Image (cartoon, grey):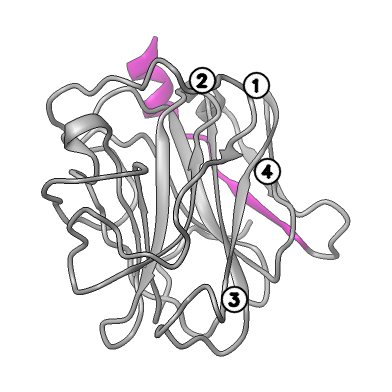
Amino acid sequence: MTPIKALAPLVVALAASGCGGGAGESSGIGEGEGPAGHPDADLPRTEDTIRGDCEVGARPDYFVPGGSAVVIGCAVLGVSGMPVELSIQEKPGTCINPAYGQGGRRGIYIPAICSLEPVPERLDVVDASVPRQAVRGYELVIWGTVPGGSDVVARSAAGPAEAAVFPVGPPVAGEVKTERPFSVFAVELPVEAACEEITIAMPGAAGGTAKVDGRPHLCARRR
């Protein structure tokens, strides 16, 4: 089993597209607490997480702890329909920050997980959790890194779901320096999928799989 681990110098922020407002920091895998949020009603609903429309290379319009960031892409999570935005920053090493929220509270929850060293040469799952600190409406969000621009699929008892994959490297990363291009992926599964082991895979890529252990405590809360 490939352990879920913290990464080393890079700062990618996953946040609701068009985020704004404050942000809190935390690290590791788990759940937060906070006031409820509501998914955007006009977002598509699908099992796959899909790429959204945002200005790649622009500065996020929400606060990202640790300094300036550059948007590398955004997506709509497949189960909840919640939007997410990815950005990258340096400080002076690098961290990956998923930021969650929507509406006037976009970007309100940004757990910090550092660090990425060296740039990944294989698929790595960084986090698998249900974002709940200051937000509501998310299901089981799994994200991590892959080399190059590989496709990523999550396989669970709930069925397969494709991840949205975003390349990181010049010119996308702008002033942020990377040793070589890589990508960040994000996918969402129903919370019930956490009852059993989940496989994250790069179809057709040798050795491109990682396992996410079952999380019975998440299933118990849902039931």
Q: Amino acid at mark 1?
A: Ala
Q: CA distance from mark 3 to mark 1?
A: 28 Å
Dot 1 lies on which element? loop
Tell me the residue that label 4 is attached to: 199
Disc marking residue 120: 3
Q: Identity of the amino acid at label 3?
A: Pro
Pointer 1 with pointer 2, Cβ within 8 A: yes
Where's residue 123, x and y in %? 65, 63
Q: Residue at x 41, y 30 (%)?
A: 82
Q: CA distance from mark 4 to mark 3?
A: 18 Å
Pointer 3 or 1: first along the chain = 3
Q: Which residues are magenta?
A: 208-223
N-terminal label among 4 and 3: 3
Q: Which residue lies at the image location 42% right of the left edge and 56% below the top edge?
A: 86
| Residue that numbered label 2 is attached to | 192
In the rendered view, tell whether residue 144 sits above or below residue 20: below
* Amino acid bearing label 2: Glu
The percent coordinates of residue 6 (x first, y second) are 40, 67
Q: Is residue 137 left or right of residue 124?
A: left
Tag 1 residue: 158
CA gap between label 1 and label 2 equals 8 Å
Q: Is residue 212 magenta?
A: yes
Residue 125 sits inside the magenta stretch? no
